[in-house]
Amino acid sequence: MAEMSPLRRRMIEDMTVRNLSPATQRSYVHAVQKFSRHFGCSPDGLDLEDIRAFQFHLVSAGISWAALNQIVCALRFFYGVTLGRNAIPERIPYARKPRTLTIVLSGDEVVRFLEAVSSLKARVALTTAYAAGLRVSEVCGLRAGDIDSSRMVIHVSRGKGGKARYVMLSPELLGILRSYWRLAHPKGVLFPGRDPDKPIEPTVLHAACRSAVAATGLGKRVTVHTLRHSFATHLLENGTDIRIIQVLLGHEHLSTTARYTQVSTDTIRSTTSPLDRLRLEVTPPPGA
């Protein structure tokens, strides 16, 4: 096993001090390592022009905007924090997100999808994701003690950016979780992986989504995040204030939550056109 370089150790220490999640730390280290290998030298010897050339190489190779921006975040952290070159991070541009409509399932499609998940553990985990609007990492990280049936809330102890929040505990979900607990008897971690002391891996839930889509024949690409999108859109269509949805989703900015207004067809249908307030005769009256 190769010995860790002092530079990598320092970067890991910097990320640990700032309480970045283990997954984020692995992603950042991998990104800087990829950058270094591309040029065949230590990354602290590379400059802004090298970063630009690397980004161009990635875009030419067809990298997705999300993957590119993850690398940008890593390089910004590495140069700004670990190397202390404060002038560089702001000059590393992010890729613009393509403006596409979010995929949302109807209520009937949610039922078909969840019932097609063959594994009990994965089915209950994905049901929880929809019922509470959780990210995949938040579902995987749930512990039995996070389910507060006395107050009917779920404590999301480590959301995005390490932020904690509460979400509602659906009575229907509580019944499902109790049935699951009687059958599976999880200890500590609510949805354990092969090691009962460690949470299920997100890849397991992603694989369960792909299998369920294939089984149902849904003509949509469904991921765990699709269930979160559907949760938010269905709340909006049922009249829930968008600011409450913002809190439930753990969004820092209301503008992030507002995108669900673009896909809420019930909201669109119920919006009154300004034409309906006018008395306008476009066609001539009968007999004219």
Image: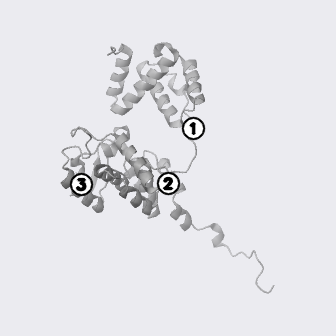
Q: Residue 207 sits in which quadrant?
A: top left
Residue identified by numbered label 3: 180
Residue 46, visible in the rendered structure: no
CB within 8 Å, label 3 to label 1: no
Q: Position of residue 270 (x, y in %)?
A: 54, 67
Residue at 35% x, 23% y is 12
Q: CA distance from mark 3 to mark 2?
A: 31 Å
- Residue 65, image quadrant: top right
Q: Position of residue 198 (x, y in %)?
A: 25, 38
Upstream in the sequence, badge 2 or badge 1?
1
Q: Earlier in the sequence, mark 3 or mark 2?
A: 3
Per the image, label 1 sits on a secondary structure element best described as loop
Q: Earlier in the sequence, mark 3 or mark 1?
A: 1
Up-down: is 11 above or below 184? above
Please give the name of the residue rendered at 54% of the width and 32% of the height, measured from the top-left corner: 63
Return the residue at label 2.
260
Using the image as rendered, state which of residue 23 and residue 241 is in the foreground. Answer: 23
Say the numbered circle drawn on residue 30.
none
* Label drawn at residue 96: 1
Cα gap from disc 2 to disc 1, whole angstroms: 19 Å
